[in-house]
Image (cartoon, rainbow, N blue to C red):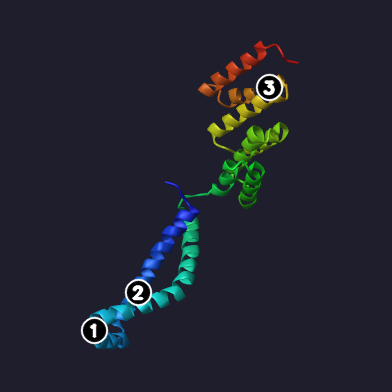
Amino acid sequence: MKITQNDLATIIRSLAIILILVLIIGMLFTGKKFSIIGDKLGAFGSFAVYIFFVAILGALIVPPITDFITQKFTGFLYSAVGVRIAKSYSLPKSYYAKGKYEEAVKEYHKMLEEDPKDVTAQFEIADICYFKLKNYSQAATEYREVLNRNPDDELWTFTINRLADIYCEHFKEPDWAIRELEKIVKRFPDSKRAVQAKRRIESIKSKGELK
């Protein structure tokens, strides 16, 4: 199960706040001075005093402590225990949803600066260049970058087909499209992927536009 880093931080922060508040309340209830105050004020007054001091102490010490715990424990889970933390792509996706495609690309590039192996961010950049910005030359370059990041077999095949589309439909270079598709046949010789690639190759050849 994947959770975002923000989700994990929120969970840890919530647990830390609960723990700290329990400790504060426990200290107040066991403290002699507060016990004396409680005896003088009665049950309701004692409860009001406890709430007052919990609120003050909570406001003063809870935020910095929880931030520290969250930062350290989240890092520990990620590095030592190996918790699978999924990245949040919410910001670039929000730009995309608003039609701010260049801003989305910039955000994905920032993510690549932090993690050059982020194949998802790279593929999103390529798709935006292809479908939204209509910059087919740049899209081809970006799809090449996807392949350079060792994607899984499914994404690798999908990306090769994208490149074949660009060569056929936009560059008018069917020979290059065939070369790309032949990579699928070579890599997965006895698979459905190879069968589909061969069909595409035959379809391109049948149009008689080869050089």
Q: Tell me if residue 41 can be seen.
A: yes
Mark 1 vs mark 2, CA separation in Å: 23 Å
Q: Which mark is residue 168?
A: 3
The residue to which callout 2 is attached is 23
Q: Residues within 10 Å of mark 2 (few under 14, many from 20)?
A: few
Going by the numbered disc 2, the residue's amino acid type is Leu
User: Tag 1, which secondary structure?
Assistant: helix
Q: Residues within 10 Å of mark 3 (few under 14, many from 20)?
A: some
Q: What residue is shown at x 72% (from left), y 33% (from top)? A: 137
> Would you place residue 191 above or below residue 62 in this image?
above
Query: First in sequence: mark 3 or mark 2?
Result: 2
Query: First in sequence: mark 1 or mark 2?
Result: 2
Residue 4 in the figure: left or right of residue 122: left
User: Tag 2, which secondary structure?
Assistant: helix
**Nearest the camera: 39 or 76?**
39
**Nearest the camera: 153 or 110?**
110
> Would you place residue 91 above or below residue 145 in this image?
below
Q: Which mark is residue 42?
A: 1
